Image (cartoon, grey):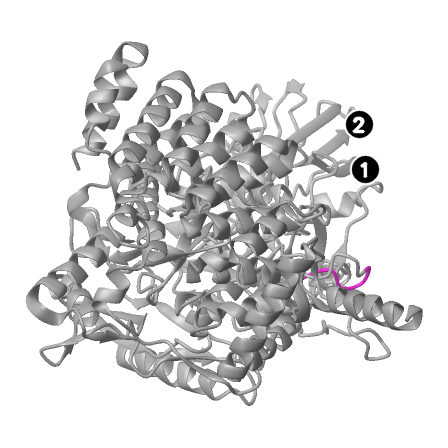
Amino acid sequence: MFRRSVWCVTACLAVGCSERVLPSLESGASTVTIIPGTPPIDLRADVNRNGVVELEGAADDEAEDTWDARHGAVFLPNIDDDAMRCRGTDMSGRPLADSALPGCNDATDEIVNGDDDLKDLARLELVRWPEAPAGTVVRLSVAPADAKVRLFRKAGDRTEAIDLDLPLATADLVGGVTFLLEGTDVVRDEAAWDGFVDVSVQVTVPDTRYWKGGTYTDTVRLRSSPVLTFHHLSPTETAYASNIPGERDSAIFLRDVRAGLTLANPNITFVTPDLEDQWTQDFFETGYASMPGPGGAQQVMRVFFRSANIENPFSRSFPLREAGRIVFTRFRGKDVAGVQQVDLGSSEETQTLNSFGNFETVPPHSTPTRNWPLGRVIRGSVRGYAPDQSFVRMTEAQKYQEPSINVDTAWLLVGHVDETISYLKASTPRGWIVLANDARLARQMLLDAQANGNGSTRLFVGKRWLDDMGNELNAETTVSALLANADVMQASAEAAVKVDEQLAILKRETGLTDAEIVKVPFLHEPVMGASLAHQPGTVNLFVIDERTVAVPDPHGPIINGKDLFKTQLESALAPYQVRVQWVENWNLYHRAAGEVHCGTNAMRAIPSVKWWEVTP
Amino acid sequence: MKQLALAVMMTAQAALAEGAFTLTLAPKERATLEQQIATARARSPDTFRQVAALRASLARLDHGKRGRYAPVTSWLNAIPQATWALADAIVFSGGVDASLPLTARVAWQAGLLESLGARREPKTEGLLVAVLVSPGLESAVRRSAADALGRLGTESAAQALVAAASAASGVDREAVLAGMGTCRRLTVTAFLAQALARASVESEQLALIKALSVNGNAWALETPAGAPAPAEVRRIQTTAAGALVKAFVATSGRVKTEAHDGLRIVNAPDTALLLAQSRAADPVGVDALLQDLRR
């Protein structure tokens, strides 16, 4: 807090006292009584969040040691790689161990890595005090002491890391100095560090004729940006899907997804890395961190979470899901960070819950007790069957989209929330609708078809199951055969009730109503006591933008020249002006227990809502 | 003579080692099985090749799996007329490399059993009973064995399941309980209902509720294969619903939620009446459930 100097000078009318000019003893006044003033110790940051630190006025000074949705300075976890110096290999060109991979970023050295890096640092200004008397000692400190931050001192064009054990030079105070603060990590565990840091300047002033001796402190509170994940109301800017080298079905899948992207916006970048892991949704999650930038803009750092999937539990160097390395080996770079958090002791049984198909973000909504303008995380998690708790602790520590909505996915073989529910922007009072699997509707559609004389109409025409030896197995069935399949009916009846249960939780947590739910029909089958989409799971779709979705081709019965299930979904989405791009994903995805959403991912536009203006 | 006997024994051991399971089958039963397999192999050799090819694909399927296990059951189900090829893999030729991940081996074993069960061939009952009572099975595999045996829907399968559940304890018992709901016979329903009334351990309660909801599953019971004893359907549903109502009003937390869902899955005609009779124990919960049932 800026401590305004008190100049209690009597008989100084003739000299025109001001706060910044020492009263002259040679003023000609016959008697002058000087009461020593309080030193003007003033540390400032971008408290009013306009992207600059203002040295004049009170905007960046008032209540600077507190933080709320109206004011308070912000900093970024500076864990991107602006100079593109990090590689995924060691000096010998060997792949870095999983544990070492995140250990290279702009915050793991003690230098500022160029002008781009400079933009990621939060600025603080120690306001100049030209009259600081000789012998004044200046120290900088941060609290808590183990906060994950580093301070730099800017001197001309140079920047140097500050050793907080050493005092600053008195000259720094005399001339003023610019400090730069970087976060060295994201907040991972609120119990260890909640993301707040108090930066204080302590000035010990000797007693002089003009200044009251003592130690004076000014403190500024800053908060680390949380990492926020995207909801479907933000349009896709970059889409991702693995390219399985030499795999024809992969090429077909990418072709169809690309068509959807082009339909939505030809400017969307489509990244198709060569990977053996086709579950692109699962091994990374996109997000961002941001702080106020000049002109009301957000200074943004894109963030990729690597999934906490343990793939090789007995490997010391590479225990994690291999495809997730791409977060660091390809995506990390200028203004792009990678984050990894995993408990290597987590159980094998629950590994599937750590895939990001089981981590979605419900779009913004309000409840009587809290607003969620940035959306809210939803995951499949029940007592006894829950994701990696260290990862959950980390996302909970981001605060703004947590605590998550937890639904039961234990009844599903894969166990992901994206198997049954999705979200779509809509011109409704809420601004979005839910798409939810409804096996009840699927069964009724087939019963109606049967009643109308279409019992022998085939589904899955031309679809095959194919093994490594090239044996093709016909997948075709008929409407009547499907309805007579006791196992499919058993799993579908269960699915209908279990999705109701998920929706009941979603309604309770968001205020969603039945009128805001679009039913997406498909049947399930039982596998190992759990449930799996028997028909292509059309709710497992890629929301490209508010008008375009890429959906697995259901290969339903063709009645009157039209696929019954395609017609139903297109009709259901038509009131929302949503176009459907059908994607052929039977071979590579559906047969392996996944669909379009499982095989895609997206980096989306940064929402206009600024997290720091929100009360979590 | 002695050498010949030794050779026969070694051959038998080798065959056993090659199967997906190490089973104790009576010599006569084994011989019958071999005969059935030989006949089927001569008639449709492709199915045997297809099962073998799928076994060869196991490592890839496991590596590419999205969830806990690769959906091996679904792949095997796509092979038509493969009853005896599956039986052959279970007993004689379906062993897999022990160095494969446990998830791959479990998915393979469970897939063989479930796909065999889905064929609903009564002649496989002896084989499935033998697997069910084999020592050392992974829980998920034992559950699948009970599930497969249950799908036969015979009274003898029902009694074998009840006997296996009664004789087992701990996780083995829970595995049998969790899988046996597919046997839609009153013998099983009554056993599950009684077991639920006595169960006090949450994991066992959950296994029983799941089994009862499968057992009384309204949609499955409307299919010919899902209702092997049509005359028992109404009593199966009423018995399952009665047990679930008692659990619903007497418990809390996840057990109550699962009982709630189970009652909706069973959707017995007299559920509302049963709930009304138990309303005093949990009026708020019962009223909410009645509302859900009207959806």
The chain containing the residue under callout 1 comes to A
Question: In the rendered structure, which segment of residues is drawn in magenta?
Answer: A316-321
Viewed as shown, does residue A464 lie left or right of B267?
right
Q: Are marks 1 and 2 in contact (CB under 8 Å)?
A: yes
Q: Quadrant of residue A368?
A: top left
Q: Quadrant of the C terminus of chain A?
A: top left
Task: Give the number of marks.
Answer: 2
Foreground of the two, A169 or B122: B122
**Amino acid type, residue under disc 1 in the picture:** Ala
Magenta region, main secondary structure: loop
- Residue A542 screen position, x and y as percent: 35, 67
The residue under the point 20% across, 28% down is B270
Q: Is residue A27 magenta?
A: no
Nearest to the observer: residue B145 or residue A22: B145
Residue A88 percent across, percent down from the top left: 73, 72
Q: Which mark is residue A206?
A: 2
Inspect the image, locate mark 2, and give the three-letter code of the amino acid beneath it: Pro
